[in-house]
Image (cartoon, rainbow, N blue to C red):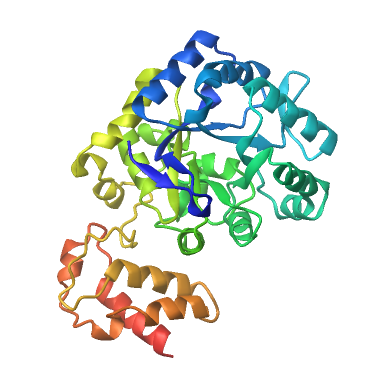
Amino acid sequence: MKYNVLGKTGLEVSEIAFGAEWYVERPFCEVEEIIRYCEDMGINFLDCWMSEPTVRTNLGRAIKESRDKWIIQGHIGATWQDNQYVRTRDIKKVKEAFDDLMTRLQIESLDFGMIHYVDELSDYEEIMSGEFMDYVMDLKSRKIIKHIGLSTHNTDIALLAVNNPEIELLMFSINPAYDMFPSTGTLEDYRDDDKYDGLAGLDSKRAELYQICEDNQIPITVMKGYASGKLFDENESPFGVALTPVQCIHYALSQKGVCSIFVGVENIDEMAEAVKYEDASESEKDYRDILANAPKHSFEGKCMYCGHCAPCSSGIDIAMLIKLFDLARIHDDVPSSVSEHYNNLTYNASHCIACGECEDRCPFNVKIVDIMLDAYDLFTQ
């Protein structure tokens, strides 16, 4: 198992992590079984957003004797009301639910207190300026939570969060389908096949988000890496082709800033499929040809920054240069930080000799030479 450091926190976590969502209302023996399996496989990162009491109790019992092996994300704002999950900002209910989480997990401190599921700007602003954030900061000051994180599916909210000095970790939904989407405050948009019409390639704001996280050491933990399993079925996949768990995991972990992916599984066999990633060959991991040739919503002609175009005969880091170009062109004026990155490249677009060898190697048939000309114009204007 490979481990990555979570930004400035210094905590080392397994790149494959356990999202326990599908163990709600399961008997303790099954929860204990998956926890022991994860420990045997070297998985040390656990997310518990669920407010359902049984799974909290079972997880607490299962990790009681091995608590020091686990780094835990627990969510603040996920409550259990009238026997169902309710996301709320009602501070009384928030406090009751968080106390319940700590009691049932049988822990005195939580590694990451996650501000739960913030997908709308008004919600974010209310949280950050009100008693909810006061409560979170109080938990941190009392060392009940060690670090503050935030979970969202909305790129605009994610960008606000990673520029907030109080937020030390971002939990974000990443997979090839969702990465085509512009910012949305409605998770259901991602599940609506009709909403994918006309979409192709990595959304530029998402590329910007991942780069900011990489530059500022704000770690990303991934949720929805399988798109709730839709990517495994060619009839359900927005691409019209099926991907494997290994390919989905590789896609997520290949994005800038990503440290770990929480996989949602229903049994040990499904977790074993995820863990196969650690010993998978490059061909087993490779998702690029599938996405480039997908019958629907192909990434054809869209740079995925995969680096298959290398080596450049002029020494240009093509993938990085195109990423900087994509980040720059979504703004009215080139941001100074992006311009600085470009100017610090050893070789830039002015060094391109238009030989076209990179285009022959690109699995997505990107018109790289044309992009070099456009990048030269943009960064020298």
Residue 261 at x, y = what percent?
Answer: 44, 40
Q: Is residue 184 visible?
A: yes
Of residue 12 and residue 76, the one placed in the foreground of this image is: 12
> In the drawing, does residue 291 fall left or right of residue 35?
left
> In the drawing, does residue 36 fall left or right of residue 288?
right
Residue sitting at x 45%, y 60%: 214
Image-quadrant location for residue 13: top left
Q: How many numbered tags mark residues here?
A: 0
Q: Relative to 317, say whether 78 is above or below.
A: above
> In the drawing, does residue 254 fall left or right of residue 59?
left
Q: Relative to 316, say whether 181 is above or below.
A: above
Residue 271 at x, y = what percent?
Answer: 38, 25
Q: Is residue 240 visible?
A: no
Image-quadrant location for residue 140: top right
In which quadrant is the N terminus drawn? top left
Residue 98 at x, y = what percent?
Answer: 72, 31
Residue ranking furthest to the bottom: 381
Image-quadrant location for residue 107: top right
Residue 270 at x, y = what percent?
Answer: 37, 23
Q: Relative to 27, say whether 24 is above or below.
A: below
Residue sitting at x 39%, y 57%: 201
Residue sitting at x 66%, y 20%: 104
Residue sitting at x 55%, y 13%: 26
Q: Relative to 170, say whether 81 is above or below.
A: above
Of residue 11 and residue 303, the one placed in the foreground of this image is: 11
Of residue 4 and residue 199, the one placed in the foreground of this image is: 4
In which quadrant is the C terminus drawn? bottom left
